[in-house]
Image: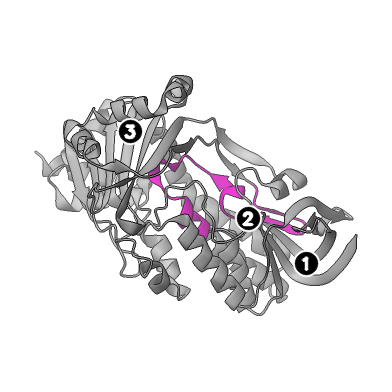
Amino acid sequence: MVMGPHFDAIVVGARCAGAPTAMLLARAGHRVLLVDRATFPSDTISTHVIHAPGVAALRRWGLLDAVISTGCPPLATYRFDFGHFRLEGTPPPVDGLSAGYAPRRYLLDSILVDAAVASGVQLREEFSVHDVLVEDGAVVGVAGSGPDGRRVAERARVVVGADGRNSRVARAVRAGQYLDKPKLQYGYYTYWRDLPVDGFDAYVRPDRGWAAIPTNDGLTLVVVGWPYADVRAYKRDVETNYLATLELAPEFAEQVHAATRVEPFRGGGVSNYLRKPYGPGWALVGDAGYDRDPITAQGISDAFRDAEVCARALDDVLQGRRSFEDAMSDYQMTRDATVLPVYEFTTQLATLAPPPPEVASLLASAAGNPDAMDMFAGVVAATVSPAEFFSPQNVGRLRSAVG
């Protein structure tokens, strides 16, 4: 085993949580190693959507123009077709931005990785972490190997797990998990050519749901979800079941029949959880620390938020301004206070069960009310908290507006 140099931080996982975390730490003057099993550019399963809070982060980092230049169109309008009524709105802005974007991940992740390297991060691709090194109860580094198979140990003041829901770092440190919920839906997606969509379009039907999202190269991603209890039936004939689901909205199904599928189906389902995102010598960002069903497509924006908040906390620690416990406990509290309302909202939607009568009535009362529809679009786009939309004051305003 070769003992390498000491780093301030080692970030495991170089996609939309890890690369920004590494970049921000390097920009703050820290020596950072970023490792990933993949090479870049490369694809990964994703809904692609970056809602306005994530777009605002890209602009703060100086990367928004690079994302826009890939040619992915803006998602200015959010539409929700509930069958008996429709909502259409523009999310309230964040830092003057309301539109989202949905770049292909092989493009987005490469932009993020390149920005990290340009900031001084040392990148190692095709690097597999085999062990997390622990001394006196604290994480002090990682051991792994690159494409040549040589085993290397690297040491750092902190190791950041940004390696997704199956995080090796989280497993190694036995990160505590809470508010767990099982897999609720299973989705398959593919890409269609000649299927014009000019915003974020979602369709909600009893026990079924899907969304159509424009992405790069004139393609549209369409993801179709079924309750997880039906996953075996769904998997038996993915294409037939996928297309049959779209027939629940005949006009949209007709558009799909006239389009051309250009890639295979990809799919999956995720468990829902929060993990304690820090401990002696380690931290977690992105899906490694918090994951929820992708039905609200907030994962990338959440990863960007984690990167900023965690990097700021770690900078305070590394610069000696705050203790590790004080800074990182604030990171956890900030994350949880932000995500818990939308976590409950998302996991309720992901059951694909009909909404309770009072919720269905409330949403129906929002139809035709521009302010209310904008506000609901903001719930999905993470610019409005569900707690605000479903507050007694807002419910009263919606009720009074219709009668």
Judging depth in this view, the residue of 89 and 198 nearest the camera is 198
Q: Helix or strand or loop: what does disc 2 sit on?
A: loop
Q: Is residue 82 above or below residue 229?
A: below
Classify residue 364 by image quadrant: top left
Q: Do the residues labelled 3 and 1 touch (CB within 8 Å)?
A: no
Q: Tag on residue 38?
A: 2
C-alpha span from label 1 to label 2: 24 Å
Of mark 1 and mark 2, the one earlier in the sequence is: 2
Residue under numbered circle 1: 157
Describe the colour scheme in one phrase.
one colour
Type of amino acid at the residue the image marks with label 3: Gly
**Does 353 sit left or right of 165 as displayed?**
left
Residue 31 in view (yes/no): yes
Q: Are the two marked residues, 2 and 3, in contact with CB atoms closer than 8 angstroms? A: no
Residue under label 3, please give it. Answer: 209
As drawn, the residue found furthest toward the bottom would be 29
Question: Label 2 sits on what residue type?
Answer: Ala
Residue 391, can we see it? no
Q: Where is residue 396 in the image (x, y as percent from the top left)?
A: 21, 42
Tell me the SS state at disc 3.
strand
- Magenta range is 276-304
